[in-house]
Image (spheres, coloured by chain):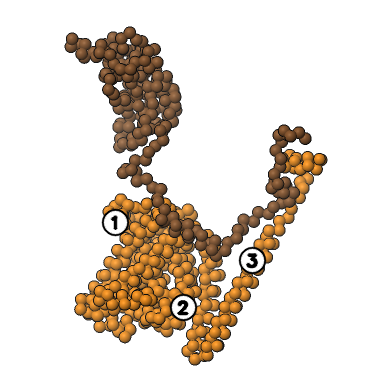
Chain colours: A brown, B orange
Amino acid sequence: MSEFHLEPKPSGAIQRAAEQSVPVTGTEPSGFFTQLKGFWVTFSTMFKKPNTIEYPEVKPEVAPRFHGRHQLNRYEDGLEKCIGCELCAWACPADAIYVEGENNTEGNQISPGERHAKVYQINYLRCIFCGLCIEACPTRALTMTNEYEIADDSREKLIWEKEDLLAPLRAGMLMPPHPMYPESDHHNYYRNEIKESHPSQDTKAGGEK
Amino acid sequence: MNNASIILDDPTWIIVAKGVLVFALCVLLTLLSVWGERRIVARMQMRMGPNRVGPFGLIQALADGVKLALKEDIIPAAADRAVFVLAPIISVTTCFMAFAVIPLTGEVNFFGEQTIMQLTDLPVGVLYVLATASIGVYGIVLGGWSSGSTYPLLGGLRSSAQVISYEIAMGLSFVGVFIYAGSMSTGDIIASQSTWWNVVVLFPSFAIYVISMVGETNRAPFDLAEAEGELVGGFHTEYSSLKFALFFLAEYVNIIAVSALATTLFLGGPSAPPGLGFTSAWFGGWFSFIWFFLKVLAFFFFFVWLRGTLPRLRYDQFMKFGWKVLIPVNIAWILVVATLRLLTQQGASQFVIAGFTGAVVLAVLGAMTIYDRSKIKTEERANQVEPMPEPSFPVPALPTSLALKEKEGN
């Protein structure tokens, strides 16, 4: 038998069990003090800190990758990342997402490239927070936040529209519709090369001139 | 001067005032104990318990009561209406009645009148408590029967069988106290404990009483009548709204009543613990109520502790424990107490008493040893399992037997 023989050696216990039948009785020594042990457990637990999180007052901190409500992200100049491809809607096992795409036009550039979402709805009565939509999204337009307080009191309120889901404008962002960054195409956007909005993108300022 | 003669000259207004006070105390204690129980059990399970209504959730029970009162009162179509309505009323009134004979304080000054916070001191006070408890069973069994439904009927029957069985053990544990005190009046029993509390002198009686009072009140681990997993809600499954609230009230008043009775019979009632006798004169005697209250609270905590610790017994185990352990042990103990009492009364010498006690102790130890040995023997017999015969048909080889064969081959 070589040293590298891989067959597992039978342990002593299994051998013994095979050689003789070990009776299983289920009786354990149960003295008077064993009976009292349980009383001590409950008594001492009284002085431990409760596990309760007092929720509405104390918000529990969730894991960084917690599946909370969705968010539709923007590029750094304010254009929406969503291209209205509906892959999220197709990926959704609960059929909670409804998307209607629309072409971007000269005066109505919502996202870089050809298309944007005209309608984007997530029905939180159906959503199971599985995150398959996030996996499906080709532009990282759809991600999940850590926000979990979504409960509401009517079916209508639980269908979130695009306005509710869109990320807020940060500094340097312009509210679409506005033209794409000068001398760039959607590839530059996709590679994250657009860092902030260009003055020429401000349609309002441009229009006033 | 015993309690009865102190109470005897009470004017009517004091009697009325006492009645109202006792009633108010019971209801208030129920509200507090529901809250207390939930808080304590929660802590035992590392939870917080109700803490939202009022400071520390103190008026949670009151809020629950209001909610119950506002709920729809449903009487099932199959129910016997009159009995269905009567059952919770019987249950709750009998519980309150038990408090009439329990002295809550020592002698106090009640608006210029020397009295004791005790409605009446019957010569057969403790028997009266037993009697009210027995009538209380009617509430349960009638409630179960009149619901016209299977689970309540089963629950009601179970519960009444249980209460009746444990009442025997309970009643027998009183006998030791009666023999010792020479009276059945609660006042006299307390007076007889002036040197030693009965919990010391009659410890076996006390232990049996404490166990049987849990059975008597249908509380965990003996809450078979309301075994949620088996009988939905037991006898009160079909009850809703205020009628359910009455059953709920009855359960908690009952707990406090048996705790108060245990305090009276075994812990000296409102008298101060040894060494603190000077406190009984404080606040014109009213301080004695604190002692009484603390003792009742201790019992109540014990109830909650049991509930937090022990799982529910099976019905047959429970009945076996009551009839085959508690009652025989109790009867043997009563014989010992009676003999000892008679020996002392007849003026037997110290040697005879000591000899008798020694003989009893020896007999108990001997019986325990014999019992243990026979138990070990039966266990050994149970452990001898026949080895499995070789199967006469081909079976796939076990991995271990392969290894064994290899070992044999080597």
Chain of the residue under the numbered disc 3 shown in the image: B
Q: In this view, which residue lies farthest toward the left?
A: A208
The residue carrying mark 1 is B59
* Disc number placed over residue B375 in the picture, else none: 3
Question: Is residue A66 toward the left or the right of residue A160 in the image?
Answer: right
The residue carrying mark 2 is B201
Lower sequence index among marks 2 and 3:
2
| Residue B254 in the image: above or below residue B53 | below
The answer to the question of whether label 3 and label 1 lie on touching residues, with beta carbons closer than 8 A, is no
- The secondary element bearing badge 2 is classed as helix
Query: Where does the N terminus of chain B fall, quadrant-wise?
Result: bottom left
Chain of the residue under the numbered disc 2 shown in the image: B
What residue do we see at 41% from left, 27% from top?
A95
The picture quadrant where one finds residue B303 is bottom left
- CA separation in Å, label 1 and label 2: 40 Å
The answer to the question of whether label 1 and label 2 lie on touching residues, with beta carbons closer than 8 A, is no
The picture quadrant where one finds residue A161 is top left
Lower sequence index among marks 3 and 1:
1
- The secondary element bearing badge 1 is classed as loop
Q: In this view, which residue lies farthest toward the top?
A: A183
Q: In this view, which residue lies farthest toward the front?
A: A3
- CA separation in Å, label 2 and label 3: 31 Å
- Label 2 and label 3 in one chain: yes
